[in-house]
Amino acid sequence: MNIILLHGSWHGAWCWHKVVPHLQAAGHHIHVPDLPAHGRNWRFARGRTRLAHMASHVCEILDRLETPALLVAHSRGGIVASTVAEMRPQALHGTAYLAAYLLRNNERVADYFRKDKDSLVRSNIRINKLTLTDSLREEAYQPALYADCSDADVALARSLLTPEPLLPALTRLRLSERNYGRVLRHYIELTQDRAVTLALQRSMVAHSPCQTVSSIEASHSAYFSKPRELADAISTIAATASAINTRSAT
């Protein structure tokens, strides 16, 4: 199956480097883009980058594929996945949210972010009004994002993290039952997450029920600390999504 992996805030395609080989070994075709103003392209547009730009970039990938894909999104990447589901429902086997923002129509990340009072990101975020970006205080990197990760993983991330365009988090989603609502949702909880807390994850799932919900005992960056377990969870979702779509087509 085609699987597209979407990174979250401040990261890029690089954060999936441990997971990709496991998914490829399972026979999947993996696509790992840098979203606009992230990764190698982080200086491009920066604060002027909007949610629509990110979603359109993913839609371009989908449009080049011959068969539908499973979209896997981490953290703030969840709003990109939901927007893509609204724009290209026919091109998706499903969306899988990895400790990601799973929002409803007319909701925005900023509102949920304020409610997550136990999040270490919430208390350590810095807003740059001149560049319209946000970033995390360096001293919060490990406790907030990489609590169970190796020193090498933290050092890699520290060298590659970039400012995050602010406007997408302020954008209210426009989702319809006709499009977004027809794409099956799956959720992977990260039970030790101190960025998007487990309480917030479960609250979002309660408001937007998913086809499957699974859990990994890991902090916010399970792609570093539990790559094989994460790949297995994604492969299980891919198999479920394929079976459901096969039954629907017959």
Image: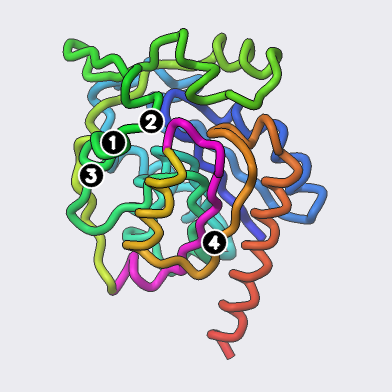
> Which is in the foreground here, disc 4 or disc 3?
4
Badge number at residue 108: 3
> At x 20% / y 36%, what residue is drawn?
170
Q: Nearer the viewer, residue 138 or 199?
A: 199
| Numbered mark located on residue 213 in the image | 4
Alpha carbon separation for disc pair 1 and 3: 9 Å
Would you say residue 207 is visible in this rendering?
Answer: yes
Q: Residues within 10 Å of mark 2 (few under 14, many from 20)?
A: many
Query: Is 183 inside the magenta-drawn segment?
Result: yes
Segment colored magenta? 178-196
**Does residue 59 appear in this view?**
no
Q: Does residue 121 belong to the magenta stretch?
A: no
219 shown above or below 97: above
Label whose residue precedes the other's in the sequence (3 or 2): 3
Position in image of residue 7 (x %, y %): 50, 36
Label 2: which secondary element: loop
Q: Amino acid at mark 1?
A: Phe
What's the CA distance linking mark 2 and mark 4?
21 Å
Which mark sits nearer the N-terminus, 2 or 4?
2
Q: Where on the picture, by quarter, is residue 142?
A: top right
Q: Amino acid at mark 3?
A: Arg
